[in-house]
Amino acid sequence: MKPLGITGGPLFECRDVHYAYQGRIPALRGIDMTLSRGERIAFLGANGSGKSTLLSLLDGLIFPDMGTILYAGRVLTEAAFLDEAFTLEFRKNVGLVFQNPDVQLFCPTVREDIAFGPLQLGMDETTVKTRLEALVETFGISPLLDRSPHQLSVGEKRKVAFATVLAIDPHVLLLDEPTAGLDPLTSTHLIEMLATAAGTGKTIVTATHDLHILEDIADKVYVFGQDRRMAACGTPAEILADTALLQANNLIHRHSHHARDHRLMRTPQV
Amino acid sequence: MAGKDFAERSIRGALTFFREAIFADETAGLPGVLQSLDPRVKIVMVLLGLLLVLFTRSLAVLGVLYLLSVLLAAVSRIKLGSFLKRTWIFIPLFSLLIAIPAMFSFVSPGESILSAGAFHITRQGVMSAGFFVGRVLASVSLVVLLSMTTRHFDLLKALRCFGIPHLFVMVLGMCYRYLYLFVEMVENTHRAIKSRVGSRIHYRKGQRVVAWNIAHLWMRSYAMNEQVYHAMVSRGFRGEPVALDRFRTRPRDWCWLLAAVAVMLLLGYVEHRTRA
Ligand SMILES: Nc1ncnc2c1ncn2[C@@H]1O[C@H](COP(=O)(O)OP(=O)(O)OP(=O)(O)O)[C@@H](O)[C@H]1O
Ligand SMILES: [Mg+2]
């Protein structure tokens, strides 16, 4: 059923991945990265540094111009997705929450949107309905169910977008700036849910430029440089302590004490 | 200055009307009689009504159908004013283009009942103009009634039961959903321009801004199109959509359908008898 667990190797492996939009707007220039099962990873980078692009590549929506991406030992190419069995397997196991919820919510009602993924992946209607009810419960979105996504606030859209992916119950969650536009309470709630998900063994990759949530969502951080390559990789604590690195990559302003304040805030009082 | 204000007001008015007429779903959520029926049954009822409108040769039948639709609107908790507004809005246009010319002898030759110089209004002409307005009014009322008492997407989904392919219905549904987004974008950009350059923008410059905006909108919709497709693929879409079907016909749906058929037959019969 889940061959991922059986193969001992990394879940995702990127080798010298290059990608350019329309063949001329470079977005990634040589990314090397491995991702193991159950890991929590953050992609940290300024605007336009290629985080969303890498997530799309990992989700098999676009394919590298140069270099390779492997998923459970299999190279992700357009041809690989012609294999129906593989596609089904991959889509069931990997879910992407898009940065723009308006893109993600394309169905006329919230209910249909949440049911969309499971139904496409061949789940039967009763299971879909049970899942729908469970998700509605956790997210507290029952009043929104029959509304059209265009009638929701940004935060509500984000919640629903997240629910549409959780409905598939994938093993790998790819999240593109999940906390952008959320109020502190909802944002905390979301982070708690991610922690729960990680507790059940899910692999979670989050793209963000929010330094505050870094320690809560990741064990390992990849920093995206302005040169469209990986600038650094380390634990959240290491990355947050490296003020020079964060400055060089436009993640904090030279005069801000953001990172330091953050460290102070988090350090347990002794 | 006044001219520009007028243009601006009409654009805004058009957008509001568009939004209200096409996207308003509020009346569909009211606990009225028609709202509680299965959309498929409603579609069949309206189709029956439309057939009768098309084939009847009696003004009285058209009148009865029109009264029925007003009555149904009333029991479905639709405000009479907004129902009438939506149905009568088409009448002036159609009258001007078709009904009024039809009254004259050069369109409908026949027995003259009023003449002014070379222009003769004929009895046959008045009759056919009356029929025309009556048909438009009755059929528009039926369709407006259907659209005001049914969630638009349910309407689309119900089409699927009449053999229209699911993919087509889904694409329609998405068009509908994103159309709204674009109406909103147009409004927002308009507001953004105003807040940036103030309302006293030079006419020429305004034109350029608008042109640029339209180009931008196209580009955005193109990029969005691709992203939406990705979002679908990411959740397992493989060209043939699967959807949740939650229409249920209950006994009362069948009762209404039977009643509708009975009324249509009765009207047809009465018309036949009075003619014979
Ligand atoms: N559809 C597209 N067409 C052309 N260029 C694009 C497209 N999408 C992204 N780019 C470009 O690719 C680069 C990387 O974009 P990407 O969206 O991956 O960045 P990001 O790190 O997600 O940024 P953000 O934090 O703003 O979301 C940017 O320079 C961007 O201009
Ligand atoms: Mg991004």
Image (tube, rainbow, N blue to C red):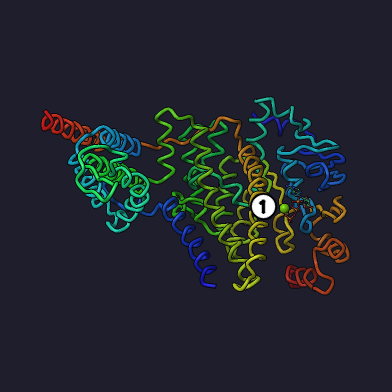
Residue B134 sits in quarter: top left
Q: Residues within 10 Å of mark 1 (few under 14, many from 20)?
A: few
B148 or A48, nearer to the observer:
B148
Q: Position of residue A134 (x, y in %)?
A: 49, 46
Q: Is residue A231 left or right of residue B122?
A: right
- Residue at the image position 57 percent from the left and 53 percent from the top: B182
Residue A24 sits in quarter: top right
- Residue at the image position 80 percent from the left and 73 percent from the top: A256
Answer yes or no: is residue B146 visible. Answer: no
- Residue at the image position 71 percent from the left and 40 percent from the top: A59
Read off the chain for label 1: B
Mark 1 residue type: Ala
Q: Farthest residue in the front direction?
A: B117
Check the image and report above or below for A12 versus B201: above
Q: Which residue is mark 1?
A: B215
Q: Position of residue B55 (x, y in %)?
A: 26, 32
Q: Is residue A5 left or right of residue B198?
A: right
A240 or B132, nearer to the observer:
B132
Q: Quadrant of the N terminus of chain B?
A: bottom right
Residue A13 sits in quarter: top right
Q: Position of residue A107 (x, y in %)?
A: 52, 44
Q: Quadrant of the C terminus of chain B?
A: top left
SS class, disc 1: helix
Check the image and report above or below for B252 versus A256: above
Q: Position of residue A251 (x, y in %)?
A: 80, 63
